[in-house]
Image (spheres, grey):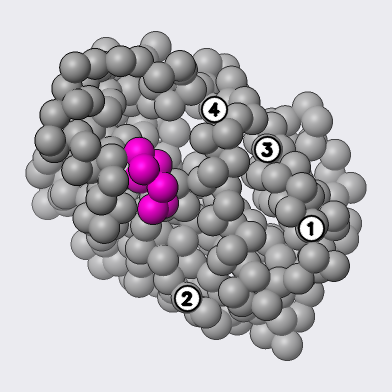
Amino acid sequence: MSNGGRCNVCSDPETLNGDSEVAVVRSNVRRFQSEEFGVWRCKSCRSIHARDEVDLDHYYAHYPFHGQEDNAALRLVLRTFPRRLKRFGLRPHHSILDYGCGSGLLVEFLKSKGYKNATGYDSYSEKFADAAALDATYDCIIAQDLVEHVDAPLETLKTFAELAKPGALILIGTPNADAIDLSNPDKHVHTLHQPYHTHMFSKDALLRAASDVGWSTEHVYMTNYTNTLFPCANLNFALHYASFFDNNLDLAFEPIRLNPRLLTPKSLFLAFFGYFRAPQADMTVIFRTGQ
């Protein structure tokens, strides 16, 4: 069982037992879609955890995000980051660390928007694996789609605290376990994202954990950064589009496919107005460290 079957993100942790809320869900990665994985919810904090230990190196070796490329659609949704950070006082001269930056597309985008002191670190990325980036402190730390992947989320938050300057911004984008209905796991197959998501915070659990390391909460966005007002660039439309095919994550990294159902009234409505009814299964929280 993952982490010994014990919640590792709250102060009153439940241990997986016969009364726990559990579910089995398939992987949303095409190569592994025939495989199923167990997840369970801590009754105390409502966070969700992977049930079983798996060889994650095997699954990450074929991870669709490894093939992500810079394109107009990606730059469209990445605009959310500088807009949100500017709102809370981040300016072009400030230093930014994208922790878990992958191929570094967000780092390059931020630099293109004037944030020349943006850098990245990712131990799994050949380009950004240099741990020298962790010898500095930063005015802003971004951790998008990271804390749900690590074995010890609370220790990861402490790492961010050590890397942050006094008064720094911490942006954490992660699934919201509160919005995941384990009685209907297939509906949430992309948020559960098995076997890659090992520990998924509930909103309250994340806010408490951040408070414990001395951060204040500036703002909570109850939607993913990819949910925008631009036509077709919203979560509802993306989920609707995926349902026409094999409903796997791989579709996000492949050329757009045509389907007659894209011209139905429902599809057109979601393309233009889906933003306003997006599921709240993801959250982005802006924290500020103590002075």
Amino acid under disc 3: Leu
- Residue 82 placed where, x, y %? 63, 60
Amino acid under disc 2: His
Q: Earlier in the sequence, mark 3 or mark 4?
A: 4
Q: Residue furthest bottom?
A: 291
Q: Earlier in the sequence, mark 1 or mark 4?
A: 4
Indicate which disc residue 219 carries: 2
Indicate which disc residue 105 carries: 3
Q: Is residue 135 magenta?
A: no
* Viewer-nearest of discs 3 and 4: 3
Q: Which residue is mark 4?
A: 65
- Residue 255 placed where, x, y %? 45, 16
Amino acid under disc 1: Tyr
Q: Earlier in the sequence, mark 3 or mark 2?
A: 3
195 to 230, vertically: above or below? above
Distance, label 3 to label 4, CA atoms, is 11 Å
Residue 24 seen anywhere in this rendered image of the structure: no
Q: Which residues are magenta?
A: 228-234
Residue located 54% across and 56% down the image: 80
Residue located 52% across and 16% down the image: 62
